[in-house]
Amino acid sequence: PLSGTTPPAPSSCDQRESKMDIMSTKARPDNDGEKKTKKEKILIIGGVAGGAAAAARARRMSETAEIVMVDRGPYVSFASCALAYYVGDVIKDERKMLVASPQKFRGRFEIEVRVRSEALSIDTKKKMVEIKNLQTGATYSESYDALLLAPGASPFRPPIPGIDAPGVFCLRSIPDSRHVRDWIEKNNVKHATVVGGGFIGLESAENLRRRGINVTLIEGGDHVMGPIDGEMLYRVNNKIKEEGVEMIVGDILTEIRYEEEEGEGSDAKAKRHLPLKLRTRKGIHIDTDLVSPSPRLHLIVLTLVS
């Protein structure tokens, strides 16, 4: 992050997701060399990096297994590390973030993929999973011989006042990145606050700066990029400053205040969003147009300053 150079193509930034493109569909033979009379059925709950890679691996291990993968989102496999670069308009077409479609899984791996399908409950004695089709609302039971759970996780949204205000976003999925882009383009965003100084937090700050937006980065720990050592941290901090990002460390966001004002003239009926007013535990006040938290704490607050 904050390298000052154009990032690599999104499909190469997460090897777990791109491996499926080069995996052979030819499976290893069974150890006993005998054909099984009954196909084993493998049910995978969750796609993207973990579930999709596991599905492709399972097909490599067995030509005959029936493999079904369900995911409640609209995309079964995408380059999550590209999301910030889509927000920054480095990637202009969101389709370039897609790694594999349900049709590709079916045609190349003979894996059935059902998107917008949510697993509701598991009966381990009967080996059945209750699944809801989120498009139709219908529920049904799906059997399995082997079950793999790869549901992923949700960004932590701190339970603070104003966390659900307009202009506060999490960045975890393609729809999330689309919502951030739309907010920036429709609301003349001049300042953004990124909460969380991990990989995606720094990538978000970098790409918001690419769009000419002033950025404040808030990290609750003693420094950004927790796993790195002091020598590397010195270089990272210098680069953050060079990019013009205001950095606040050892502090946390405690409040977001949202207000509107009436429009004027021909826009009298339209309400105008005022900048979000943020406050940290140490009493720092920030006016911002957009807030975004990173997956560990990935919050982007975009505020409108015309």
Image: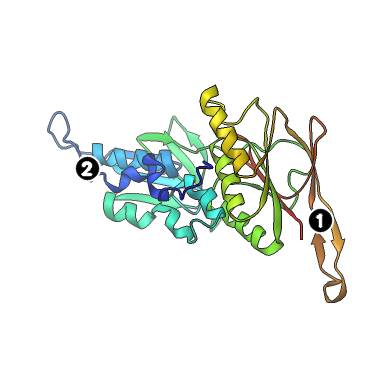
| 133 vs 166, nearest the viewer | 166
Q: Position of residue 232 (x, y in %)?
A: 51, 28
Occupied quadrant, residue 256: top right
Mark 2, residue position:
63
Residue 294 in sight in this render = no
Q: Amino acid at mark 2?
A: Glu
Q: Position of residue 111 (x, y in %)?
A: 32, 48
Q: Amino acid at mark 1?
A: Leu
Colour setup of the view:
rainbow
Q: Position of residue 44 (x, y in %)?
A: 40, 40
For image coordinates 25% across by 40% down, the residue present is 60
Q: Secondary structure at mark 2?
A: loop
Residue farthest along the left direction in this orientation: 33
Q: Secondary structure at mark 1?
A: loop
Residue farthest along the top direction in this orientation: 230
* Residue 55 as seen in the image, left or right of residue 215: left
Q: Quadrant of the C terminus?
A: bottom right
222 in relation to 265, above or below: above
* Residue 60 as seen in the image, left or right of residue 82: left
| 139 vs 146, nearest the viewer | 146
Mark 1, residue position:
274
Occupied quadrant, residue 52: top left
14 in relation to 265, above or below: above
For image coordinates 41% across by 48% down, the residue present is 8
Dot 2 alpha-carbon crowd within 10 angstroms: few under 14, some 14 to 19, many 20 or more? some
Residue 2 in sight in this render = yes
Dot 1 alpha-carbon crowd within 10 angstroms: few under 14, some 14 to 19, many 20 or more? some
Question: Mark 2 against mark 1, which lies toward the viewer?
Answer: 1
C-alpha distance separating marks 2 and 1: 58 Å
| 224 vs 38, nearest the viewer | 224
Q: Position of residue 285 (x, y in %)?
A: 81, 40
